[in-house]
Amino acid sequence: MSDNFLPFALPCLGEEEINEVVDTLRSGWLTTGPKTKRFEEDFAKFVGQPYALAVNSCTAGLHLALEAIGIRAGDKVITTPYTFTATAEVIRYLGADPLFVDIDPKTFNIDTHKLATTLDNVDGVKAILPVHFGGQACEMDPILDLAARASIKIVEDAAHALPTYYKGRMIGNFGDISVYSFYVTKTVATGEGGMIVTANPDYAERIRTMRLHGINRDIFNRASSNLLGWSYEVVAPGFKYNMTDIAAALGIHQLQKANTFLQRRADIAAQYTQGLSDLPVRTPYLNPYSTHAWHLYVIQLELEELTLDRNTFTERMNAAGIGTSVHFIPLHLQRYWRDRYGFKPEDFPVALDVYQRVVSLPIYPSMSDADIARVISTIRKILIEAQK
Ligand SMILES: *Cc1c(COP(=O)(O)O)cnc(C)c1O
């Protein structure tokens, strides 16, 4: 890698984040405390929901969400194979099984027609776990309808969707529970971290207890109450999923910048779409019902018109000093999922086809216009040379 390698992703941290972390360190309160509480309050206000519960990852949050809605061994939870393994692994944590439904070829979100057919034909489905791929909303109206008709719950994997609006309403206001990620590559980053949002007080209560050892009061309340400050009650074998105040210190300021970050990401996306418009690639489809959080900018190579495949393309980008990624390697091709359920690649033909064409380009607020121009000119050079 040369000195001027352009990484695929970088967090965008300013003096505000640095000062808040230093303040946290000086305060002596490193784990869940006042900063986490403030981050939760800010987040609840941002999304417009009564309950926001901070955790140490989106994976932890999805696990807690499924636990709270009562997913048990033997249940089935519908999601797509076109996601990160975390979405499906949490279903297995509870002894339940994911039921994969293929994606829409334009948005890479769950195909709601196939979802309807699956619900008509399979027993034992307890929940739908839609993933808002790349930052565009799933078709929430049909999903809400189908879930209501089948009397099942919706837990949204909103790891890419901060912020995303579906028909003018922010994601986080549709399903029973929504879960966000603050992993280092995500639109709002705390290194590791996640947030669970819900309107349901019972789910909030259960999640609050289960995220910290099944204890019915968190450490902050315990330490600040003077009556038997050392006392607590264990009500369940919970988990250790609480967020640290060091992470929350980052999150408080990242959240304040979320809309500014989005403007820059959208600007980068517009420059890419314009600069690549005459090449044998498909630029991202824009669903008229959804805004785009631009967590990912995913192009699809028109392989029929090219003499190279996707892997050769990403190698050439890398050789030219530009980082790229692939979202996602479909879960049904991964050994664990393939072997457990006996999947064949063609079981999810849309996911398979899309996977072979996609490349995720760098898109983060600290990219300069020169960086964007360099990505475009490098892609132009590679693809024009490889045109049939
Ligand atoms: C990143 C990601 C997760 C997991 O987030 P963590 O905070 O790293 O646990 C889950 N689902 C999707 C779709 C993701 O991209």
Image: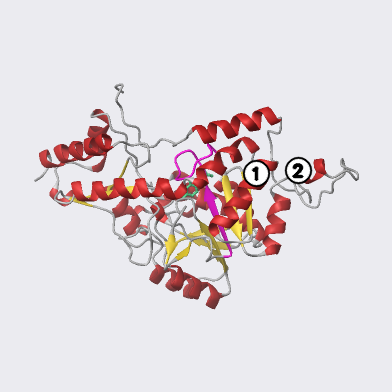
The reply to whether callout 1 and callout 2 are in contact (CB within 8 Å) is yes
Question: Mark 1 highlights which residue?
Answer: 36
Q: Give the range drawn in magenta.
A: 176-192
Residue shown at 45%/68% (left/top)?
140
Whole-percent x, y for residue 250 in the image: 55, 38
Whole-percent x, y for residue 109 in the image: 39, 60
Mark 1 or mark 2, earlier in chain: 1
Residue type at tag 1: Thr
Whole-percent x, y for residue 167 in the image: 42, 68
Question: Mark 2 highlights which residue?
Answer: 220
Count the marks: 2
**Which of the 4 image quarters holds residue 177?**
bottom right
As measured in the structure, the alpha-carbon distance from the residue carrying label 1 to the one carrying label 2 is 10 Å
- State which quarter of the image contains the N terminus: top left
Residue 145, can we see it?
yes
Mark carried by residue 98:
none
Q: 10 Å neighbourhood of mark 2: few (<14), some, or many (≥20)? A: some
Viewer-proximal residue, 96 or 53? Answer: 53
Image-based side of 374 in relation to 182, left or right: left
Q: Is mark 2 on a helix, strand or loop?
A: helix
Image-based side of 261 in relation to 235, left or right: left
Viewer-proximal residue, 90 or 165? Answer: 165
Residue shown at 72%/58% (left/top)?
205
Image-based side of 311 in relation to 92, left or right: left
**Which of the 4 image quarters holds residue 350?**
bottom left
Is residue 364 highlighted in magenta? Answer: no
Residue type at tag 2: Phe
Residue shown at 33%/63% (left/top)?
287
Q: 10 Å neighbourhood of mark 1: few (<14), some, or many (≥20)? A: many
Residue 92, can we see it?
no
Mark 1 Cβ inside 8 Å of ligand 1: no
Q: Is mark 1 on a helix, strand or loop?
A: helix
